[in-house]
Image (spheres, rainbow, N blue to C red):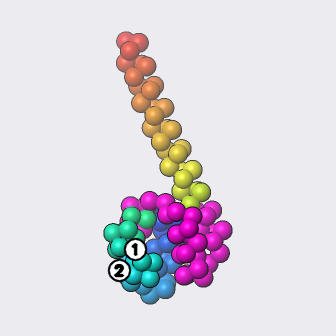
Amino acid sequence: MHPLQKKLQQLRERAGLTVRALAEKLGKTPGYVSRFEGRGEIPSPELLCELALLYEVPAEELFELAKSSQLERAATEIDTRHRSALALFRKQRK
């Protein structure tokens, strides 16, 4: 679970909201909320600001967590591609 995903879930639970109740407050579907809480999708900056207001936390905190999540994903993707390229290179050299 990415840091932002975990934080958003904790904030929702601390506010005493279900996924459905949060979705209603945001004018979104429960499936949409599940995308950023359950599947780790990064919400738009506008939605992060909405969530910060709703949960009464600094928007900067959510933006920093979003940045960390993005960087973590990018590093993982680069590492995966690097390993795949090396494996292909080594296979071709045999």
Residue 10 in picture, x, y percent from top left? 48, 76
Q: Report the residue marked by disc 1.
A: 28
For disc 2, the neighbor class at 10 Å (few under 14, some 14 to 19, many from 20) is: some
Which residue sits at x=63%, y=71%? 59
Residue 49 highlighted magenta (yes or no): yes
Image-based side of 10 in relation to 33, left or right: right
Q: How many marks?
A: 2
Q: Quadrant of residue 55?
A: bottom right
Q: Quadrant of residue 50?
A: bottom right
Which residue sits at x=45%, y=34%? 81
- Check whether the beta carbons of the residues at disc 1 and disc 2 lie within 8 A of each other: no
Please report whichever mark, 1 or 2, sits nearer to the chain's N-terminal start.
Answer: 2
Q: Nearer the viewer, mark 1 or mark 2?
A: 1
Question: What is the number of the mark on residue 20?
Answer: 2
Image-based side of 62 in relation to 37, left or right: right
Residue 49 in picture, x, y percent from top left? 58, 72
Looking at the picture, does residue 16 appear above or below residue 66? below
